[in-house]
Amino acid sequence: MLTLNGFVKGEVTDYKQWTDNEFSITVKADIGPYVAGQFTKLALQDENGEWLRRAYSFVNSPNHALGRKCMEFLIIDVPNGGLSPKLAKVNIGDDIYVGDKPSGFMTLAEIPSNATNLWLLSTGTAIGPFLSILGESETQQRFEKIILVHAVRTKQELVYQALIEKLLQQYNGKLVYLPIVSREQHPGIMSGRIPQLLKDSSLMNAVKISPNKQNSFFYLCGNPAMVHDTRDVLIELGFEKHLRRSPGHFSFENYW
Ligand SMILES: Cc1cc2nc3c(=O)[nH]c(=O)nc-3n(C[C@H](O)[C@H](O)[C@H](O)COP(=O)(O)OP(=O)(O)OC[C@H]3O[C@@H](n4cnc5c(N)ncnc54)[C@H](O)[C@@H]3O)c2cc1C
Ligand SMILES: NC(=O)c1ccc[n+]([C@@H]2O[C@H](COP(=O)([O-])OP(=O)(O)OC[C@H]3O[C@@H](n4cnc5c(N)ncnc54)[C@H](OP(=O)(O)O)[C@@H]3O)[C@@H](O)[C@H]2O)c1
């Protein structure tokens, strides 16, 4: 594996467009090991030869059928962004640079051993690392219930429906999927924002599961304002932030 400033040259092997500004790319690159829920960096050069590098979470588990050197990323093309509009324009066969040392603590290993109910709360592209975690057989064995919440602006942004359907079947009743759309109304789809829906118990009522301090753990990921407001609600409900030296009930990853 030839590395240059911590990056390995890889190749774009697939591209899927979900909406006008959301897409997934598949990349092949000989990077170092990673675990489900982690992220690496992608890098491209701009017009002046300057490197643009940003963090992106794996959507796949490293143990998927295609092997860990084949990886998938779900990306939003941020208007006037530095790197994401360039990633939106890549073609299959293009070179892409991938950080060779993935990292991140939003993993199975960080969840306290007493947790049997796992709540995965995401906005936008942050469903990616949760799909990675759900791709691990350990997740299916270890937890009694897993609640996957995905909050987006529009129904079109409820991505990976086929994969989620497959996971629901595979998890055989252990997995509950709760999509939320904030800027449209659709029959049968919850409307609103995660913190408020948690505060007024709508989330719990919808999945018919009440979290408690004995067996529940929450991962929050995505929009930092959602993470901030959800933390506040969880604390109000009596849950505590998880620290390795002092096990708690929730942990999070901000995307910006
Ligand atoms: C640990 C980690 C994992 C990440 N994983 C992903 C991922 O899997 N997919 C992904 O698309 N992005 C992810 N991001 C965000 C990503 O690193 C970039 O910030 C994003 O692609 C924008 O980069 P840019 O250069 O185009 O925009 P910049 O010029 O850097 O503009 C940044 C602004 O874009 C907006 N923004 C950034 N990321 C997002 C996002 N995901 N959704 C909505 N708005 C956003 C915010 O307003 C932010 O202030 C992750 C970030 C972190 C820290
Ligand atoms: N040009 C376009 O048409 C277009 C379309 C989509 C996205 N974008 C760009 O893409 C980026 C946003 O992408 P995104 O839609 O994936 O992410 P996002 O703005 O984080 O929205 C995802 C979800 O998070 C919710 N949210 C926002 N703030 C929250 C808070 N404080 N608490 C709880 N929930 C909150 C949103 O609800 P709300 O809807 O209530 O905010 C939405 O349901 C921005 O850069 C935006 O400019 C552009």
Image (tube, rainbow, N blue to C red):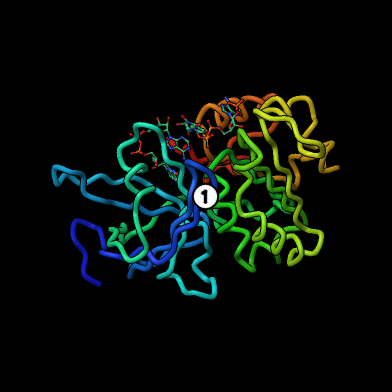
Q: Please give the residue where the numbered disc 1 appears in the rendered image.
A: 106
Foreground residue among 71 and 147: 71
Foreground residue among 246 and 98: 98
* Residue 192 position within the rendered picture, expressed as x and y whole percent measured from the top left: 70, 28
Q: Residue at x 21, y 64 (%)?
A: 3
Amino acid on which disc 1 is placed: Met
* Residue 32 position within the rendered picture, expressed as x and y whole percent measured from the top left: 35, 67
Q: Is residue 76 left or right of residue 216?
A: left
Please determine whether, in this image, residue 102 is positioned above or below residue 52: below
* Residue 73 position within the rendered picture, expressed as x and y whole percent measured from the top left: 46, 55
Q: Quadrant of ligand 2?
A: top right
Residue 230 falls in which quadrant of the image? top right
Q: Is residue 36 left or right of residue 86?
A: right
Residue 165 falls in which quadrant of the image? bottom right
Please determine whether, in this image, residue 3 is positioned above or below residue 16: below
Can residue 195 be seen by looking at this rendering? yes
Foreground residue among 129 and 237: 129
Residue 234 falls in which quadrant of the image? top right
* Residue 169 position within the rendered picture, expressed as x and y whole percent measured from the top left: 76, 64
Q: Residue at x 58, y 47 (%)?
A: 127
Quadrant containing the C terminus in the rendered view: top left
Quadrant containing the N terminus in the rendered view: bottom left
How many residues crowd around disc 1 within 10 Å: few (fewer than 14), some, or many (20 or more)? many
